[in-house]
Image (tube, grey):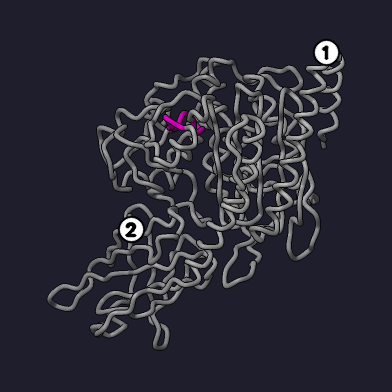
Amino acid sequence: MKTLSKILCVSAIAGALVACSDSVKVEQEEGTSLEQKIRQTAEQSLDAFNIPGLAVVAVKDGEVILAEGFGVRDMESQQPVTPTTLFGIASHTKAFTAAAMATLVEQGKLDWNDKVIEHLPSFKLADPYITRELTIRDLLSHRAGLGLGAGDLMIWPNTDKTTDEVIAGLANVPIQHGFRERFDYNNLMFVTAGEVISEVSGMPYHQYVEQTLFEPMQMDESTIGFSRIDESYDNVAVGTIEMDGKLHRFPLDFLEDFSAAGATAASVDDMSRWLLTLLNEGETPNGERLFKEESLHDMWQLTTPLPVSANASEQGTYFRGYGLGWFVKDYYGVKHVSHSGGILGMLSFTTVIPEKEFAITVLSNQQAFGALTAIVQESLEEVLGVPDQDWVANESKKYHEFIQKKADFKVEAVDEPQPSLALSKYAGTYTDAWYGDVAISKQDDTLRIDFTHTDMLKGSLEHYNGNTFIVRWDEPLLEADAFIDFDVNRNNEIKTATMEAVADFTDFSFDFHNLKLEKQ
């Protein structure tokens, strides 16, 4: 396995070619100050946010100034996080997908503006016009007209569906907005992009990315899909979720079906090479070119606009949007490029400031995103000289208020709830056109529900009011309890059912509201 020592040696040799002037000395001292600030913030964040483990890598002026682990990778084993500990980086995978697509564009095998159906003739969305006009660029920029997280239940939590089945299901996922009308984050368009890459390259998505991107960068530990990690490699982080005042260990097989949308496992050691490559406009630390500067410009050019809040304006942002696999904005007069990622129990956050030759990635095995924000923002204060804030204090306050909000949450009771039908009336198989079968059965005096493609979505129905029940999942750490409303006709027959998450803090990928369950 390759380590950071090789990169640091290359950096040291390059540094030796520069005259030892006072200005260089000042830059080095500033770099040391930056390194210390990042390290201090990471150490503070462990306690402030109740996080078992973090890993951080920061790159400045062509050198890795810090690549370290903090805390433990597994709260059970208490083994430490190291620079080579693998984390699920989740949606940062989208940046690799865009880069892989760029290499195919450069090879002349496709164009950003190619229609998707030119490469996937069977591809179909619920709207014929969008099906016909959707381009590769649209796949990578969240503007297809599908709603936030629409269709994610086909892949989240991990399902038994194949990629072909997921893409076929898109034909029945409801379109919620006009084509190219607005930004709505959608994972399944990136899953589709991964299938385009497979079709055009002639090899599976994971193989193409690893061969074309990871291997030239010597990202030797990184894989697409945790199931493909070498069994002898045990330096792997285990996620945690905070609930009821304590952390709960949450091992997961990391969403193999997310593929091009979010299935990468990587370490900060490996991510250092990616950050160096980005800051060097597509050229790896070894001098090998992955993609042209023009391709990086395409990826980092705003494609889909996003609104700017008043708070963001106060912090030096006047435009923001999504490029191809990256969020882009201005920030105190410089270009700010970033992407975060989240799966159950883990988070990632990468930020690049090209003009300052600075980039940072933070990985965590806990879901307190404020910690990642604090580490990144404290580093940007140092790099950009922007107004100082106590980011750890501010973000931890928000995080603990959010944790308390979840702890206090209760479904508002109905004063005089109406009775339900006999429980046996609700039992049966319900089918959604894009997800598939959901089975409801009567077991003793309880109704049980089983999303048949998703092992983790099994639970009990608790009567709420009339023909409305609350689904309480067997795994409470999902934090995804949902209402289920049965539509009963005048003959007391049930034909359909709909669902909706009970709480507003449920992850958007539990898109129960897009289901239309028809009783068979």
Residue at the extreme left of the image, as rendered: 490
Q: Position of residue 286 (x, y in %)?
A: 76, 20
Query: What amino acid type should be assigned to the residue bearing mark 1?
Result: Val
Between 154 and 162, which is closer to the camera in this rendering? 154
Does 365 sit left or right of 10 as displayed? left
Query: What amino acid type should be assigned to the residue bearing mark 2?
Result: His
Residue 324 falls inside the magenta stretch = yes
Q: Position of residue 473 (x, y in %)?
A: 47, 71
Residue 485 falls inside the magenta stretch = no
Q: Which residue is mark 2?
A: 513
| Magenta segment | 317-328
**Secondary structure state at the residue bearing disc 1:** loop
Q: Establish if 519 lies above or below 236.
A: below
Which mark is on residue 18? 1
Residue at the extreme front of the image, as rendered: 387
Q: Position of residue 322 (x, y in %)?
A: 44, 32
